[in-house]
Image (cartoon, rainbow, N blue to C red):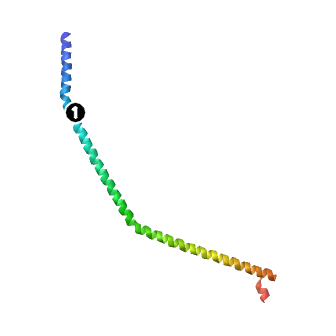
Amino acid sequence: MKLQMRQAAIDAINAVIEWFKELPGRVMAWLEQTIANVVSWGSNLYNSAKEAALNLVNGVIETITSLPEKVQEIGKNIVEGIWNGINGAVNWIKDKIAGFSNGLIDGVKAALGIHSPSTVFR
């Protein structure tokens, strides 16, 4: 039993020594993997930023390119709006004149006591 305890202690000490011997290699492997991950992250970040910048430039160019068409459409809408407003005012004025004329004719008919002015003029 004494021999077995001694062998177990030697095995434990050897395992600790082996672990410490492998430690620098493990640390080095971990550092290499960490550096590789940082490089990969930086590369992905660069590519993402590059793509975002290209999308921004393309968006600005597209917006500037479409401006003349939009300005033309806005101008057309303004002219159509003014034209519709004028037409609406003309119709309103016609309605007011027609109402005034009808009121005048109704007033003359009432003053003469007739239903139709042609009866008096005849």
**Among the 4 quarters of the image, the one containing residue 69:** bottom left
Q: Which residue lies furthest to the right in this view?
A: 113
Give x and y (percent) for residue 23: 20, 29
Give x and y (percent) for residue 103: 73, 78
Q: Residue furthest bottom?
A: 122
Q: Which amino acid does label 1 sit on?
A: Val
Give x and y (percent) for residue 82: 54, 73
**Relative to residue 15, is residue 66 depicted above or below?**
below
**Among the 4 quarters of the image, the one containing residue 98:** bottom right
Count of numbered circles in the view: 1
Name the residue beneath numbered marker 1: 27
**Relative to residue 106, is residue 60 depicted above or below?**
above
Is residue 36 visible in the rendered structure shown here? yes
Residue located 59% across and 73% down the image: 88
- For the N terminus, the image quarter is top left
Residue located 44% across and 69% down the image: 71
Q: Which residue is at the front of the view, 71 or 19?
A: 71
